[in-house]
Structure formats: C-alpha cells, structure tokens
Amino acid sequence: MNFEQRANIKFCFKLGKTFTETHNLMKQVYGDNCVARASVYEWYTRFKNGREDINDDAHTGRPKSTINENSIEVVRNFIKHEPKSSVRYMEMELNIPKSTIYRILTEHLGLQKVCARFVPHNWRLLHDNAPSHRSILVTDFLTKNHILTINHSPYSPDMAPCDFYLFGKMHLSMKGKRYVDVEDIQRACTTILKDVPLNDIKHSFEMLLDRAKRCIESDGDYFE
C-alpha cells in the first residue's frame, strides 16, 4: 500500500499539483488508509528535490531494536501526543523498527489496529441513530473492524454526549470566526477538544446515564 501511494504522490507532483492538493487527493482516494500527512510531505519533498526512486531507503547498519521498559515508554509517550501517527511515521521519528513498534503497541500497550489506527481493545462507539449511521455500509464496516456499538434510544435525539455536550462547547468557541479551509477547521476543533478537562468529559458521561434514566421514565417521550 505504501509503495502504491508513493507512486501516486510522484504522479501528482509530475502533474504539477501542490503538496496540499496532493494530500487532499490522497485522502480522497485512500481515506483512513492514507499514509500520514508527514509521510506525504516527506515523499513530495523528495520528488520535488529530484528523486525518482520510490523504494524505501536502505537501513543497513541500523542495530536491531529490543523491547524493554525504555522503548515501551518511548512509544507510549509518542502516541500520547501523536495519537494519529502511523507505524511508519513512528519508525522514522523514533528510529525503532516497525516490527518492534507493532509488537509494543499490540502486546505491551494492549492496542488493536482499527482503520489504520491503534486503539484500545475495550472501547465502545455511541452514535445518534441517524439513518446514515445505521446503513448496511457502516454496519459492515464496524463489524469488520470489531467495533462494538452501544444501543441508543430511538426516541431521544439528544442522548449522545457529542450532541448535548461537546458540540455546544465547540460552537461557543468557534462562533463568529472564519476559517481558511477544512484543515484549518479540523485544527481548531482538535485544539478545543484537547483543552476540555478530563473531569468534564467524565461528567458528560455521568450526564448520559441521568438522561437515559429520564428517557426511560418518560416512556419514550421527549423530556427537553
């Protein structure tokens, strides 16, 4: 997959596409399987500087990495600050072989690969029962990637924490501001979400339980 994507990065560069255009096209074609933005930039720059070869650089002489408490901590701290990083990107940044990073993620940190990302085994998905979320395409995708969903009441549109909590915080911070492009909006949203205190997130799920009880007591009628 990486080899194919490098070839397409080179193809876009030869067509005169900018890096941003190239990255957007790559995301459009490969979706969640697209290599990290940093990798796209790295290879685009290489081709811009005259490189023609799309094969990996030789890693001769690099010592084999062993798994120890230090390497585990290095990987743990990296994904804590860069949770969307690919194994390939981590390999370049940490100078640790991909096989070692993969073992640390799966065997020592208890993560599993879902949608080209590594996530905890015990996470659950709660969505708002929109028809698009219940489509066969989405249901098959969730099943294929072993993503468990929490059943959502069909009578209350405001029971998901995103609806009654997170979206409100984002709207309040972003109201009246203008953004250059989609990526600018994504950066703003990410910054806002990262600034939300952990205790506030915990409280939103406590609110979810309270709302679920109120929905049950109201026998399915709206209560707000």
Image (cartoon, helix red, strand yellow):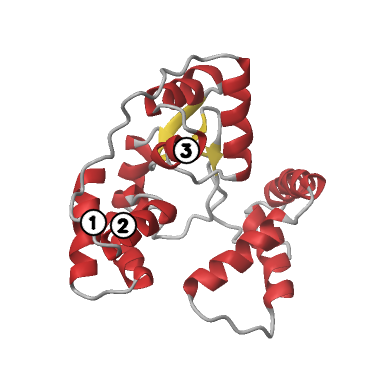
Q: Earlier in the sequence, mark 3 or mark 1?
A: 1
Residue matched to label 3:
90
Which of the 4 quarters of the picture holds residue 75?
A: top right
Residue matched to label 1:
51
User: Callout 3: helix, strand or loop?
Assistant: helix
Q: In this rendered view, identify the residue nearer to me: 147 or 74.
A: 74
**Residue 173: which disc?**
none
**Residue 46: which disc?**
2
Which of the 4 quarters of the picture holds residue 83?
A: top right
| Amino acid type for the residue under numbered disc 2 | Arg
Q: Mark 1 and mark 2: span between their CA atoms?
A: 5 Å
Q: Are marks 1 and 2 in contact (CB under 8 Å)?
A: yes
| Amino acid type for the residue under numbered disc 1 | Arg
Q: Mark 2 and mark 3: span between their CA atoms?
A: 19 Å
On the rendered image, what quadrant is the C terminus found in? bottom right
| Amino acid type for the residue under numbered disc 3 | Met
Q: In this rendered view, identify the residue nearer to me: 4 or 185.
A: 4
Residue 84 shows in this picture:
yes
Measuring from the top left, give residue 200's x and y in whole percent. 80, 50
Question: On the picture, is 119 further left or further right than 70?
Answer: left
Of marks 3 and 1, the one in the foreground: 1
Q: Dot 3, how many residues are within 10 Å of its Cα: few (below 14), some (14-19), or many (20+)?
A: some
Measuring from the top left, give residue 87's x and y in whole percent. 42, 36
Residue 159 shows in this picture:
no
